[in-house]
Image: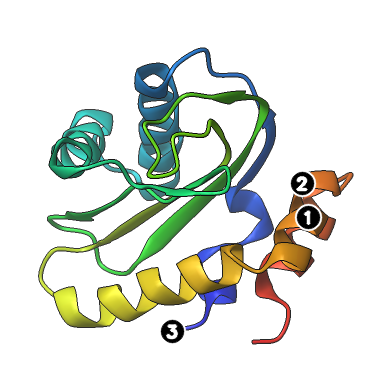
Amino acid sequence: MKLSEIITPEHIILDLAAPSKSRLMHVLSDVSANHLHLGQNAIFAALDKREKLGSTGIGEGIAIPHAPVPGLAKPFALFARLSKPIDFNAIDENPIDIVVVLLTPAEKPLPNLSLLACLARTLRKTDRIARIRTASDVADVHRAIVEEE
């Protein structure tokens, strides 16, 4: 599966204001639930359960909260660029300003791991993340994410 199949321009939020990690996770769960027509509480609970295992802040200002969600038919991603960096307990202890929620079907775990790895590799490319951080609109962010597929 390609990133362009799970991150569409409609799944990109720019300049999201979130004062804390908890508030950010609630907002992203709510937006994801609206896109997926699923319950916000189920999505938040799945993401929160995963975060309790260890922060999904991968460093360099990036977090990829991810979790399997029962009943989800196919992977879903929601990208957000924050208006102001927040503490996320990331591995490098730096605040994050880029977050991608990755929700995957609970029934098919193996393909989901490769999707998570692909997303992490894409966001760790210095030139690409710089373009994402300075992009002026959703279309530019989307192009930066999905280029070279």
Q: Height in image: 79 above or below 68?
A: above
Q: Residue furthest top?
A: 19
Q: Height in image: 11 above or below 90?
A: below
Residue drawn at x 57%, y 42% as measured from the top left:
61
Of residue 41 and residue 131, the one placed in the foreground of this image is: 131
Of residue 2 and residue 34, the one placed in the foreground of this image is: 2
Residue 147: x and y in percent read 73, 78
**Mark 3 to mark 1: distance in Å?**
25 Å
Q: Can you tell which mark lies on residue 1?
A: 3
Residue drawn at x 67%, y 66% as measured from the top left:
145
Q: Which of the marked residues, 3 or 1, is nearer the chain's N terminus?
A: 3
Q: Residues within 10 Å of mark 1 (few under 14, many from 20)?
A: few
Q: Give the position of the N terminus as an image quadrant.
A: bottom left
Report the number of numbered marks: 3
Residue 94: x and y in percent read 52, 34
Q: Residue furthest right?
A: 136
Label 1 belongs to which residue? 130
* Amino acid at circle 1: Ala
Residue 73: x and y in percent read 25, 67
Badge 1 element: helix
Residue 62: x and y in percent read 53, 47
Label 2 belongs to which residue? 133
Quadrant location of residue 39? top left
Q: Are marks 2 and 1 in contact (CB under 8 Å)?
A: yes
Camera-nearest label, 3 or 1: 1
Q: Which of the marked residues, 3 or 2, is nearer the chain's N terminus?
A: 3
Quadrant location of residue 149? bottom right
Residue drawn at x 46%, y 24% as measured from the top left:
87
Badge 3 element: loop
Of residue 46 and residue 71, the one placed in the foreground of this image is: 46
* Amino acid at circle 2: Arg
Q: Height in image: 5 above or below 149?
A: above
